[in-house]
Amino acid sequence: MAFIWFSFLSSIFLLILIGRKSIWLGLIVAAFTLGILNLSFQDVATIFFNTFTNPPILILALSVGVIPLIGGVLGRSGLIKNLIQSLNMRSKTFLALAPAFMGMLNMPGGALLSAPVIAGVGKGASKADYVAINIWFRHILVMIYPLAGLLATTKMAQLNLYTEVLYLLPGFLLLLLLGYFYLLKPIEDTTRLAGQHNWKNILTPICIILTAPVIHLVSITLFKNVMGEIPLMIGVLAALGMSFYFGKLPLKNIAPLTVKTKPWRFFLLIMAMFIFLNVFKASNASEAISAIAFSKTFLIVGIGVFLGYVTGRVQVPVSIILPIFYARFGAAGMTPMVFAVMYFAVFIGYVVSPVHPCVSVTIEYFRSNLKEFYRKVLKPGIVALAIVTLFSIIFVG
């Protein structure tokens, strides 16, 4: 029993350590370490091979790899810039809306797209205000966007992606209200942006971003016998094609954009997540962990927010918590509501994590610091965590 715990904790330590530089590599090393200490080399190799050759997982990973390219094309073509210049609204509304919309462009260093857009908007806003607003509002819409973190994690939990979006809507509204009262309302500014309103410039990038989830949702609803990952791939490729077409960007730009957005990192991340999950299921670690007497709330909220904070990721904590939950409470216990509570808790830790890349690059851009950032986000973060903890204690256990 002691050796099993040693192997599990060692794998998690390596995951967190290596994951600070390369999250997919950290997952691979963690999975291999856990596997080789509990299984035969042949069993570990078989799990790796079967995961990499599993059609649904492979197509899912390829689809996720295309998504950052869409964001890259929207940025390079000027479609996002045109959208911003076509808005005519209150400055405070813009401060929330611009980072939220641009947060759906899943690409490395994406916070640097929205940071310069909101800089200087809102009279009286400090550097720390801009940092907190850019981080907070950039991510709350991502929490319910189907093609972000939910895509792979709901697949791992074997739950319906769009059902989970509905369960997370209350959490989204809570974070929206907390962001307004704690971050936007204190800024004394009643000015408006004087952009030249243009519906075409506004709707074009929005329609492109919504194309993939719409095609996916409609297809899996109408064609229930078709593998769900196939319409997902069709959807993201359609969105990519539309971004090139409406952005009037030559296809020769695909090579430099691929180098810039590094889509293979996202592909490898999805594959590594499922490898770790499959190795954990096959190892003896599940039996050891299931013997611990801890509550569901402690695991999905307490451990969830902690792992979100220390890893600065969403998918990785979910990859760790799911097999532990299965071992302790059974797969049937992972209901849509339980998953939503877990995902929300992980998300809170992730948003304010100092190892979250968006946090570090935004602080650097506005020349602020972590202390000032936490002065702004600590209260809304604690309130959100207290509410989800209380909800979990009452309704989950």
Image (cartoon, helix red, strand yellow):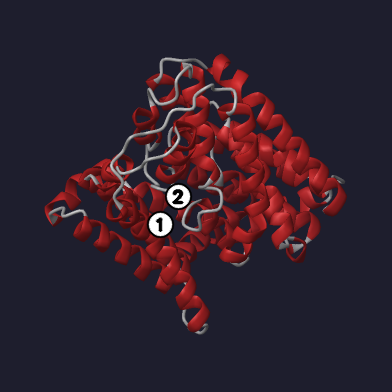
Depth check: give the residue in front, 383 or 310: 383
Q: Which badge, 1 or 2, comes first in the chain's sequence?
A: 1
Identify whether 383 is placed above or below 107. above
Q: Which amino acid does the dot numbered 2 rest on?
A: Leu
Viewer-side label of 1, 2: 1
| Residue tagged 2 | 269
Identify whether 200 is placed above or below 175. below
Residue 47's disc number: none
Residue placed at 60% from the left, 31% from the top? 310
* Image coordinates for residue 104, horizontal then vertical, percent: 43, 48
Q: Is residue 215 left or right of residue 375?
A: left
Quarter occupied by residue 21: top left
Residue placed at 61% from the left, 38% from the top? 308
Quadrant, the N terminus: top right
| Residue tagged 1 | 64
Q: Is residue 377 left or right of residue 78?
A: right
Element carrying mark 1: helix
Give the distance between the C-alpha atoms of the residues marked 1 and 2, in whole angstroms.
Answer: 9 Å
Quarter occupied by residue 175: top right
Specify few, some or many for label 1: CA neighbours under 10 Å numbering under 14, 14-19, or 20 or more.
many
Contact (Cβ within 8 Å) of mark 1 with mark 2: yes
The answer to whether residue 283 of the structure is visible from this angle is no
* Image coordinates for residue 381, horizontal then vertical, percent: 66, 31
Q: Which amino acid does the dot numbered 1 rest on?
A: Val
Depth check: give the residue in front, 106 or 330: 106
* Image coordinates for residue 53, horizontal then vertical, percent: 43, 67
* Image coordinates for residue 114, horizontal then vertical, percent: 38, 35
